[in-house]
Image: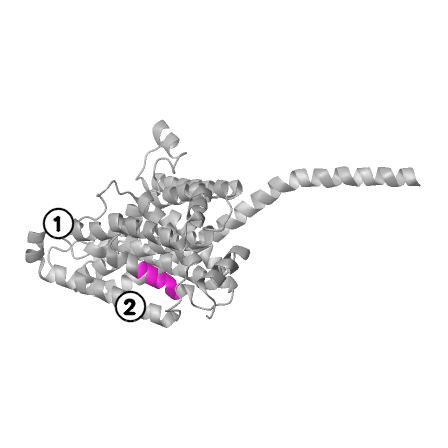
Amino acid sequence: MGKTIEDTRGLSERNPSMMRDSNFELLRVLSILCIISFHCAWEGGFEYPEFCFNKFLIESFHMLGELGVNLFILISGYHMLYGKFKPSKLIALLLEVQFYNWICVFLCVHFGTLTLDKRTILTNFFPIAEYKYWFATVYILLYILSPYINKLLLSLSQKDFQRLLMICLGIFCIFPTLYGALKNDTETLFYYNRFIWLLIVYMIGAYIRLYPPQKITDPVKWLGISIFIFFLMECAIYILEKFQPFFNKVGIIGGNYFWRPNTILMIALSVSLFLCFRFIAVKPLKPVNLLASTTFGIYLLHDGQLNFYMWQVLLDSTRFTYSRQLILFIPSRVLLIFTIGACVDLLRQFLFRSCKNVILAIPFERILKALSMKQDSEYGQTD
């Protein structure tokens, strides 16, 4: 705790894997749970003409989706700043996306929600280009560009880095949050898109890696800040819904206005919760790290082309629209989807490892055999 910022930066440069213990892996698990919760609320078909407790509950779960996305990219910016681009990792990511995309395609065909024709087959061979998974597309683009982004960020002084972040947050966060209230939208100003925003979040994660906070290093305090910000967001839901006629005159329509990733409250919540886990001292825990390794696969499986059918038909979410059990329905289904997704991805990891080992083993065995024959020949000459 007594190290200066420069000392911490030096340690990070010497040990790129520093701090990558189970604290961040646990945060990955929490993030995917938040994202599944959001999809359950967003895709479940819940509609409420008037404000009620269940509508308040659904709009509260809306807040969690973009929180999870921001947290994932904060973790990426923090760890990838000193990471090296590996073509093998890029190929692995692309293959993983293909794997889950085709699982969803076959399931959709089985359930009768998709008909395969030549065009459908062709476009599904390019899920990244076709934006089948918006987060996967943005993440892979960030990964491809990360070596050059990192060089730029590492060349900046702390003051220049701060100025860059303030300019970006002013243009794509602060102004949109205030002005966006007139149109109930914060994501259409200044050519905003998800790539631009997640690039900014990536830079915030990188900045925290270089210059971690020195005044507040107690995770409990950061957790308290996070709870307070979330409380403000919950109050906003209630106030905006309760006095909706008044706010409709201003322009704000929905109570979940602050759910978007680039609102002031959402990025503040994301950073404070990230810092909470940043300062938690947790030793490596294999079960947590193993579960965390499945989070990208869980996202790809549950947010694919089967999304609508899964929530509204298979899980029949709409029957809980006005039920008192809604508060239990969403968490229970989230855990169900998480468990199924984790099991499927562990199986995928095993299959991918097996295929990789088979591919690598073929030339390796030939090399060993050739070396063995050469050694036998040399020994024979010696004798």
Q: Residue at x 21, y 48 (%)?
A: 186
Measured as percent of width and height from the top left, residue 120 is found at 35, 32
The quarter in which the C terminus is drawn is top right
Q: Compared to 273, does 65 lie above or below?
A: above
Question: Counting residues from the N terminus, which is met first, the one under dot 1 or under dot 2?
Answer: 1
Quadrant of the rendered image containing residue 365: top right
Between 177 and 108, the one nearer to me in the picture? 177
Residue 97 can be seen, yes or no: no
Measured as percent of width and height from the top left, residue 143 is found at 44, 44
Between 270 and 239, the one nearer to me in the picture? 270
Disc number for residue 182:
1
- Element at badge 2? helix
Is 154 within the magenta?
no
Q: Compared to 245, does 92 lie above or below?
A: above
Measured as percent of width and height from the top left, residue 215 is found at 37, 69
Q: Residue at x 22, y 54 (%)?
A: 318
Quadrant of the rendered image containing residue 227: bottom left
Q: Compared to 91, does 121 lie above or below?
A: above
